[in-house]
Amino acid sequence: CDKEKADASVADWKKKWKLLNTRLGQFCDKGLYLGENKVSLFDIVAYPFFERLITIQHYAKYEILDKWMDEFPRVKSWYNAMLELDGVKATKQTDEFLITAYKSYRERGEAAY
């Protein structure tokens, strides 16, 4: 992993997270996007991306699910609310599963570049 490129990507992603943090606050200041435990299409579509952030955290050594979340409190509130949903609890993959599953994909990508 090229540290300089990775750091540039972090800066770009944090800009997007800042926008997401603002947009999540459109309807309520905590919890799910629409509030009042109303699950929206956004919640369903966005959550799997966040579930897989553990792989970036593991391989790139960025503290995404800890320090990044603290920088974006509305994103953190949304993510934590998602983790409490019965459907997410029933289907959530373990961190180890996601890290292991991503390993061969990462190795193929590194070999190609």
Image: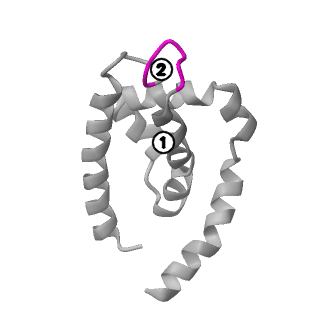
Residue range of the region highlighted in magenta in the rendering: 33-39
Query: Does residue 80 appear to the left or right of 5 in the view shown?
Result: right
The residue lying toward the viewer, choosing from 101 and 96, is: 101
| Residue found farthest to the front | 41
Give the residue number, with chain letter if any, for mark 2.
31
9 w.r.t. 31: above or below: below
Can you tell which quarter of the image residue 71 is in?
top left
Magenta-span inclusion, residue 52: no
Dot 2 crowding, Cα within 10 Å, few <14, some 14–19, many 20+: many
Q: Which label lies toward us, 2 or 1?
A: 1
Against 54, residue 90 (above or below) is above
Which of marks 1 and 2 precedes in the sequence? 2
Residue nearer the viewer, 69 or 43: 43
Foreground pick, 83 / 44: 44
Q: Residue at x 37, y 27 (%)?
A: 73
Q: Which mark is residue 38?
A: none
Residue 17: percent from left, percent from top: 32, 41
- Asked which secondary structure carries label 1, the reply is helix
Locate residue 20: give its quadrant: top left
Residue at 36% x, 74% y is 2
* Residue denoted by label 1: 46
Q: Residue at x 34, y 32 (%)?
A: 72
Q: Is residue 90 left or right of residue 33?
A: right
Q: Main secondary structure of the magenta part?
A: loop
Badge 1, how many Cα within 10 Å: few under 14, some, many 20+? few
Q: CA distance from mark 2 to mark 1?
A: 14 Å
Quadrant showing the C terminus:
bottom left
- Under tag 2, what secondary structure? loop
The answer to whether 91 appears left or right of 63 in the picture is right
